[in-house]
Image: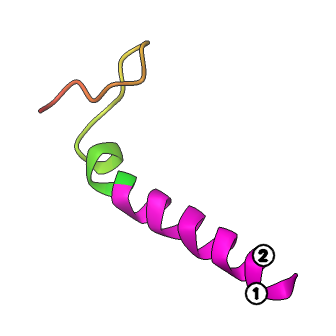
Amino acid sequence: MLDSNLQALQDFALAVIDEIPSIAAGPLDHAGYPIYT
């Protein structure tokens, strides 16, 4: 059980880390997409 929780947490962390460049690229418009590409 603990192993699966750690795996889920790791998957979530990797997904968040993968999104950081687009979040940091600039302000988001109303649709949630970066204005700057």
Determine which quarter of the picture holds residue 35.
top left
Per the rendering, the mark at residue 26 is none
- Residue 27 belongs to the span the image colors magenta: no
| Category of crowding for the residue at label 1, using alpha-carbon neighbours closer than 10 angstroms: few (below 14), some (14–19), many (at least 20) | few
- The residue furthest right is 1
Q: Nearer the viewer, residue 21 or 2?
A: 2
In the picture of the structure, the residue carrying the numbered disc 1 is: 3
Residue 26 vertical position relative to residue 15 in the rendered view, above or below: above
- Residue 8 belongs to the span the image colors magenta: yes
In the picture of the structure, the residue carrying the numbered disc 2 is: 5
Percent of width and height locating residue 31? 42, 14
Marks 2 and 1 sit apart, C-alpha to C-alpha, by: 5 Å
Residue drawn at x 28%, y 45% is: 22
Determine which quarter of the picture holds residue 20.
bottom left
Task: Name the residue type under label 2.
Answer: Asn
Magenta span dominant secondary structure: helix
Using residue 22 as the reference point, say whether residue 36 is left or right of it: left
Residue 26 vertical position relative to residue 19 in the rendered view, above or below: above
Whether residues under marks 2 and 1 lie with C-beta atoms below 8 angstroms apart, the answer is: yes
Query: Which residues, given as a range, are shown in magenta?
Result: 1-18
Query: Where, quadrant-wise, is the C terminus in this rendering?
Result: top left
Secondary structure beneath label 2: helix
Query: Where, quadrant-wise, is the N terminus in this rendering?
Result: bottom right
Using residue 37 as the reference point, say whether residue 5 is left or right of it: right
Percent of width and height locating residue 18? 35, 59
Residue 9 vertical position relative to residue 24 in the rendered view, above or below: below
Residue drawn at x 84%, y 86% is: 2
Task: Name the residue type under label 1.
Answer: Asp
